[in-house]
Amino acid sequence: MTGWTWQYEGYEPRDERLRESLCTLGNGCFATRGALPECSADQVHYPGTYAAGCYNRLTTRWAGHRVENEDMVNLPNWLPLRFRLAGQRWLTPDTGTVLDHRQILHLSDGLLERRTRYALGGRRTLSVRQQRLVHMADPHLAALRTEFTVEGGAVALEVEAALDGGVTNAGVARYRDLDGRHLTHVHTGTHAPDTVWLRCRTRTSDIRIGLAARLTASVPATTHHTFPRAVQRVLLDLVPGRTVTVDKTAALHTSRDPAITDPLGTAIDRVSAAPGFDALLEGHCTAWRQLWRRAALHVPGEAGHVLRLHLFHVLQTLSPHTADLDVGVPARGLHGEAYRGHVFWDELFVLPYLNLHFPEVSRALLHYRHRRLDRARSAARASGRRGAQYPWQSGSDGREETQELHLNPLSGRWLPDHSRLQRHVGSAVAYNVWQYCEASGDAEFLHTKGAEMLLEIARYWADSATHDERLGRYRIRGVVGPDEYHDAYPGAREPGLDDNAYSNVTAAWVLERALEVLRVLPEPRRRELVERTGLDRGELDRWEEVSRTLHLPFHDGVISQFDGYGELAELDWDGYRKRYGDIRRLDRILETEGDTVNRYRASKQADVLMLGYLFSPSELRRLFGRLGHRLDEDLWRRTVDYYLSRTSHGSTLSGLVHGWVLARARRAGAWAFCQEALRGDIADLQGGTTGEGIHLGAMAGTLDLVQRGLTGMETRGGALLLDPAPLPELSSYEFAVRYRGHWGVRLRLERGRLEITVPPSDRDPIAVRLPHHEVRVEPGETCELLLPD
């Protein structure tokens, strides 16, 4: 990594999947993995193109089970372009002799450059330079420029470009026994001498897909249609020292796109009207420059380079174009097929960053949740509850997409999957509603769709709580917390745990926020909501009571992850590390041994400590006080240390959360976890998972760590609250945010000093609150504040 570029030197087959993920190009509407255009899907390479929100459902009969899954569909491949000496085999890094190979990801321009030099025999060499873009200004266009240069003797080079409709979803090994043939009714044709097309549809969701490609070369192309591919070929006469260029421009549309009738006709029209590569590149680079101005972090050193890569991939998945779509936050971006492209709770780590840069995107992502509110209400009714029960995994229509079985790749056994019991996903939706409205000042959304979601999620929590006469408190039973390792008590017949601390505290927070929203709603709107939802005074009184009396378990002087956690056995951590080395997926290791992690005090990732990620120390103390408990610094530090020594970090989110929490609780060790969060994908710390798609939540979370975590920034009560806790390794940096109509509010943190600049506008001044100081910064002014040691 060098400034604004990310480079890979040499060709390493074992690293191709990782490189393909990290060199993915996208624009918020669709993305294409960074596979080499001359290579087909095999054990080394996996080209893939994915459109946001494009899902299909298939059922497979496997081992006596009926397995149904909805997947983000691998769409027809627009990328293929291969070449060979006339009459010889096609050249690829796997079949030819590679003298040099380099891939360069230009982050500033959203451009992937590839340079390869092949030996042709007889002292002849072929140099191939390619530039690829997925257009950030026109979200339906992509382009590939290929330059061929021969040395040592003239050659006749055959070049073949194609649109390939024969793709399947086969990018994740553990899914390959399940049906991945999502496309059907593939047809190809010719529109003009230089333009071919392909159309198809998904098998069950019936999404129509139109793809058109234009090939521009110094000689005319010939066209061949060989099912399921549309093929164009040119024969180039190469002479030493003279570069010959071939440009391929593609347009992709689906029937989910707004303001179109026929995806194929629209794709043909768009590619026909598209300018040449140079003009496309100019408009694309301009769009990227605008994005960087709105979102860039200026952080020195290696951490800054990695953060820039993370931001690049966040913007490729969730750009301003996303604001026009009905999509959620895919946990693995648009970069691969892991998690089947599903939406989990990762928006909890993504939206806080977007809120302060692209609030229109945050609002659209929350609209995705609101459009599926009726489905969440139906799920609650099916489980005997009132309110809204959001699914742990979501896709096209908001039903629960969590599979009922999952494969342990170590043992080869399929096991029951109880992760759908993570009801705390509803709290994540509510938290994001509140955070978005506080950061944007969007009262219209809060008073309408936001209030409706908050109230229905609060209603679900209140109805899930049962009163325990012995404790004199309410309890929430039969859930799974963020930890995910623990889904049942040892030997229990039914899955689920009681009084998960994270779930209960966030449920209490949701109930309190819902009551607050009802108090501040304009009276006509409050009356509408009450009439529509059937709320009555008795129900609201119950919300108030539950929000103050939910049970929080403790053991050994720390907060219990769930009731009974302290009764579990201690694990021989040193022994397992000595035997296995990497024990991030301890659950799989123990299951292979015939044991279960449910028996032990061991967590996959932060659970109780997630509370320190969501809430500032003062807010967390207030929440515990409302629940009747005193949370002092000693209790919290003991809790942090307790779980820190019992967590295997089997999720990329774990290092992020621990780094965030430790920066506040005690700085020792915080930077090591921050580095792990930064390196999670670039070093593939989860052991091969990045090649199946990047971890979007962790990437966005590292950006938010710098933006909110280390500055202590909160958007609350119409003010910016700041309580900086800079780490020695990251104590000087700057960034700009968009806050309540102010574009480009710049914060610069220098050792011991905080500078805030509000750009000129006709907006009101910004109230900035530090723990012991408050200022109002007028538009056009800069305020400098000294920070306490």
Image (tube, rainbow, N blue to C red):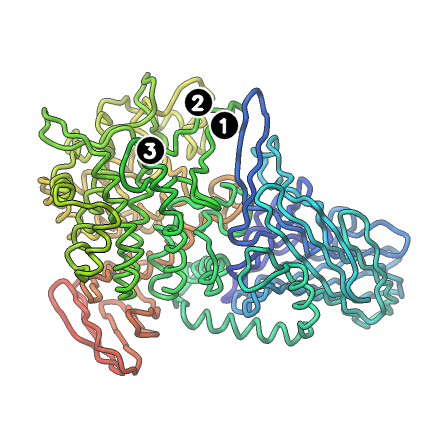
Image position of 498 (left or right of 342)? left
Q: Which mark is residue 603?
A: 3
Query: What kind of element bears circle 1?
Result: strand
* Extreme residue in the front direction: 531
Q: Quadrant of the C terminus?
A: bottom left
Residue at image location 31% in from the left, 66% down from the top: 732
Image position of 261 (left or right of 720)? right
Marks 3 and 2, Cα distance to the nearest angstrom? 15 Å
Q: Which mark is residue 591?
A: 2
Residue type at numbered disc 3: Ser
- Marks 1 and 2 in Cβ contact (< 8 Å): yes
Image position of 11 (left or right of 744)? right
Crowd tier of the residue under label 3, counting other residues whose Cα lies within 10 Å: few below 14, some 14–19, many 20 or above = many
Residue type at numbered disc 1: Asn
Q: Nearer the viewer, residue 756 or 394?
A: 394
Precedes in sequence: disc 3 or disc 1: 1
- Give the image quarter of residue 606: top left
- Marks 3 and 1 in Cβ contact (< 8 Å): no
